Image (tube, rainbow, N blue to C red):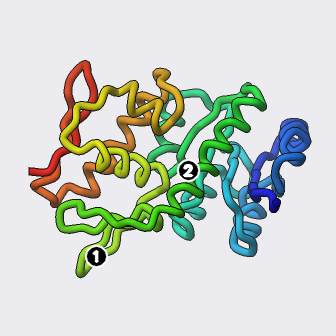
C-alpha cells in the first residue's frame, strides 16, 4: 500500500530528525529546513498533508502556509510550533491551517491528528453528492460553493464544518458535539478554533440572507435556512 506523503518544514535539525525518524515507518516524509525550499518542493511534487514550523529562515511558516493555500485550498496543514500565544494560534487558523500543535507534544498525538486528517480527506473525496446552500451548490468532494457566476473554494476544515451543519440543519448542536465530531477533542483551544472557522463560514455566506448560523449562548450553534 502506497504511503501518504508528508511535507515537513522545520529548521531545528534535532526536532526534525526525531519527528522524521518517528514518522518515516508510517509515511513518506520529506523534510526541509527552510520555508523557501519547502515551497519549491510543494510546487514540484504532490503531498497529502503539510506539517509546518513557524520560525524558519528564508520564509516563515505563516508565509509558507499562505503560499500553499493560494495553490491548494484542500491539503491539510498542521502548524507545529513553540509559539504558544493565543494570537499566533488564531493567526495560523485564519491563514488557513487546519490545526496547531504546540511544542512539546507527543508523537502519538501528532500521528493521531495526521491520521484523522488523512481519513477525512479520503472520506470527503469519496462523497459524490452536492448540497444546496442558499443560491450555492456545495460540493464537499471539491470543497467548493458554486453558483452561476461564482466559485468559492473552502479549506478542508471549513468544508467539514459546513457539511456537518448541513447534515444537522435546524438542530441545536452543542459545542462539545461539534468539536468532537470535527476536531476529535473539545478542549479550550479547539473551542477557539471552532469560533474562528464559524466566523469564516459566516463571512463566506454573508450575502445569503436565508442562511443563519445562530450562536446559542452557553449551548452551541444552530444552522438553519429560512
Give the alpha-carbon distance from disc 1 to disc 2, as whole Å. 26 Å
Residue tagged by mark 2? 120
**Do tag 1 and tag 2 residues touch (Cβ < 8 Å)?**
no
| Residue 132 locus on image (x, y percent) | 24, 63
Task: Determine whether 153 is above or below 204 in the image.
Answer: below
User: Residue 175 appears in which quarter of the rendering?
Assistant: top left
Mark 2, secondary structure of its residue? helix
Specify the farthest residue to the top. Answer: 218
Q: Residue at x 31, y 50 (%)?
A: 201
Which of disc 2 and disc 1 is earlier in sequence? 2
| Residue 145 locus on image (x, y percent) | 33, 66
Mark 2 burial class by Cα count in 10 Å: few <14, some 14-19, many 20+ = some
Task: Determine whether 62 is above or below 216 in the image.
Answer: below
The circle drawn on residue 88 is: none
Depth order, front residue of 7/62: 7
Report the number of numbered marks: 2
Closer to the camera: disc 1 or disc 2?
2
Depth order, front residue of 10/50: 50
| Residue 23 locus on image (x, y percent) | 84, 43
Q: Residue at x 46, y 21 (%)?
A: 188
| Residue 225 locus on image (x, y percent) | 14, 51
Q: Residue at x 19, y 55 (%)?
A: 206
Depth order, front residue of 97/132: 132
Mark 1 burial class by Cα count in 10 Å: few <14, some 14-19, many 20+ = few
Mark 1, secondary structure of its residue? loop
Residue tagged by mark 1? 150
In the visual, does 74 lie left or right of 206?
A: right
In the visual, does 34 lie left or right of 174?
A: right
Task: Determine whether 80 is above or below 143 in the image.
Answer: above
Quadrant containing the N terminus in the rendered view? bottom right
Depth order, front residue of 205/14: 205
Amino acid at each position: 500500500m502506497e504511503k501518504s506523503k508528508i511535507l515537513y518544514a522545520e529548521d531545528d535539525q534535532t526536532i526534525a530528525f526525531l519527528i522524521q525518524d518517528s514518522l518515516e515507518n508510517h509515511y513518506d516524509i520529506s523534510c526541509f529546513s527552510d520555508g523557501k525550499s519547502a515551497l519549491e518542493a510543494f510546487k514540484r511534487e504532490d503531498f497529502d498533508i503539510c506539517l509546518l514550523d513557524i520560525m524558519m529562515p528564508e520564509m516563515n511558516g505563516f508565509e509558507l502556509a499562505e503560499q500553499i493555500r493560494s495553490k491548494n485550498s484542500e491539503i491539510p496543514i498542521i502548524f507545529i510550533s513553540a509559539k504558544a500565544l493565543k494570537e499566533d494560534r488564531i493567526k495560523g487558523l485564519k491563514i488557513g491551517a487546519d490545526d496547531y500543535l504546540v511544542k512539546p507534544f507527543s508523537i502519538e498525538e501528532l500521528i493521531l491528528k495526521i491520521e484523522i486528517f488523512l481519513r477525512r480527506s479520503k472520506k470527503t473525496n469519496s462523497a459524490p453528492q452536492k448540497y444546496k446552500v442558499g443560491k450555492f451548490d456545495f460540493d464537499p468532494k471539491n470543497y467548493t460553493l458554486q453558483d452561476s457566476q461564482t466559485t468559492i473554494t473552502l479549506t478542508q476544515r471549513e468544508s467539514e464544518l459546513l457539511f456537518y451543519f448541513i447534515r444537522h440543519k435546524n438542530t441545536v448542536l452543542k459545542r462539545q458535539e461539534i468539536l468532537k465530531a470535527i476536531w476529535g477533542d473539545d478542549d479550550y483551544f479547539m473551542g477557539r478554533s471552532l469560533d474562528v472557522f464559524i466566523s469564516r463560514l459566516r463571512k463566506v455566506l454573508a450575502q445569503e440572507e436565508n442562511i443563519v448560523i445562530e450562536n446559542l449562548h452557553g449551548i452551541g450553534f444552530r444552522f438553519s435556512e429560512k
